[in-house]
Image (tube, rainbow, N blue to C red):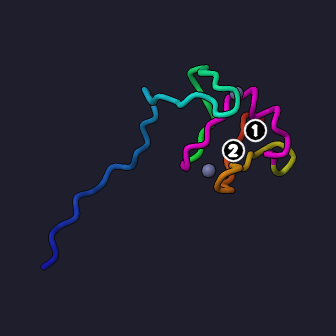
Amino acid sequence: MSPATPATPLPRRKQGRNFPPCMACHADPGFTWTCDCGVAFCTECLSRNTDLWMGGGRTWRCPQCGKEHLGPNR
Ligand SMILES: [Zn+2]
Ligand SMILES: [Zn+2]
């Protein structure tokens, strides 16, 4: 008989999360656009790096792992 697996709560709470500083300009604006792999950009650097943008600016693509994320220009 397998032990009952406890219901794991989804990590939905993002409040109080510390955002890492921007890896491009090393600014720490209190919020950065982050990827699971550790990449972090401030809004300014993200908008400046137009080669990261996909689909006409709706999403940005992580330069390290290639994962796509929703950007600020939704
Ligand atoms: Zn920056
Ligand atoms: Zn990534």
Mark 2: which secondary structure? strand
Does residue 38 sit above or below 73 in this rendering? below
Disc number for residue 74? 1
- Residue in the image at 66% along x and 52% along y: 64
Q: Quadrant of ligand 1?
A: top right
- Residue in the image at 69% along x and 56% along y: 66
Q: Amino acid at mark 1?
A: Arg
Q: Amino acid at mark 2?
A: Leu
Of residue 1 and residue 38, the one placed in the foreground of this image is: 38
Q: Which residues are magenta?
A: 36-53
Left or right for 23, reference 49: left
Quadrant in which residue 34 is drawn: top right
- Percent from the top left, x then y, of residue 71? 72, 39
Is 39 contained in the magenta span?
Answer: yes
For mark 2, what is the residue?
Answer: 70
Gap in angstroms between the C-alphas marked 1 and 2: 7 Å
